[in-house]
Image (cartoon, helix red, strand yellow):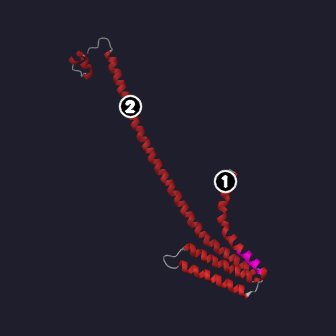
Amino acid sequence: MEPLTARHWLALAAPKAAPVVATSTVLILGRIWNANGAEHSTGNAALMVVLAAGAATAGAFASAGRAGDPVIAGTAFASSGALALAGVAGYADGISLPLLLWAVATAVAYGLAARYWRTDRRDTLTHDRHTIERREEHAHIERVEALRAGAQIEAARTGAAYAEQLATALITRAALPGFDAAQLAKAGLPELPATTQED
């Protein structure tokens, strides 16, 4: 039972930590690149500018028009931001500007992710509410059908009990000393056909 609880906690925490992990990874890689010769390298900076601009352009094209794909556009824009952050982290000689861009990128990433999380939570709540309503409706139908079946069974039992009591009464009446079906007929009392046939 413990591994399931740990897995459930990680499944909830992983999406919340993803933006900061992604931007921190880009910052760390940029600083490693800086330490390995990218600092003040115009060629490396130009390469990152071209790559970031290309990714942003791809995102703009992917989001344009009615047939725009938001997933591709979001991925392209995120790639553009990551390339820009990596370029600044690699080119700058100090840590202040890369840290500032990292904080801005992380805030933007959380802002975009929060919108998605709200939509996902709203969809999940709507689905759960719809499922609960369907279950309650099915449970209500089942209760009504169970009551109807119980009433039919009770009516059948009542009818059977009445028939049994009537048969017992007829047998008891016929067994009484001095019972005469003909005298009952003369008195004008109705007689059952089965008793008349017996007589």
Magenta span covers which residues?
A: 26-34
Residue closest to the eye, 148 or 79: 79
User: Is 164 positioned to the left or the right of 29 in the image?
Assistant: left
Residue closest to the eye, 188 or 36: 36
Amino acid carrying label 2: it is: Thr
The residue mark sitting in front, 2 or 1, is: 1
The residue at the point 70 percent across, 85 percent down is 45
Query: Compared to 162, does 21 lie above or below?
Result: below
Q: Earlier in the sequence, mark 2 or mark 1?
A: 1
Query: Compared to 101, does 132 lie above or below?
Result: above
Name the residue carrying label 1: 4
Q: Which mark is residue 181?
A: none
Q: Quadrant of residue 182?
A: top left
The residue at the point 57 percent across, 63 percent down is 121
Residue closest to the eye, 97 or 53: 53
Residue closest to the eye, 19 or 80: 80
Separation (CA) of disc 2 from disc 1 = 54 Å
Q: Position of residue 7 (x, y in %)?
A: 67, 57
Element type at mark 2: helix
User: Is 62 positioned to the left or the right of 137 in the image?
Assistant: right
Q: Is residue 32 magenta?
A: yes
Name the residue carrying label 2: 158
Which residue in the rendered view is the most extreme toward the top?
A: 178
Query: Compared to 11, does 91 lie above or below?
Result: below
User: Is 92 positioned to the left or the right of 185 in the image?
Assistant: right
Amino acid carrying label 1: it is: Leu
Within-10-Å neighbours for mark 1: few <14, some 14–19, many 20+: few
Q: Is residue 178 magenta?
A: no
Q: Position of residue 151 (x, y in %)?
A: 40, 38
> Which quadrant of the rendered structure holds the C terminus?
top left
* Residue 192 is at least partly visible in this image: no
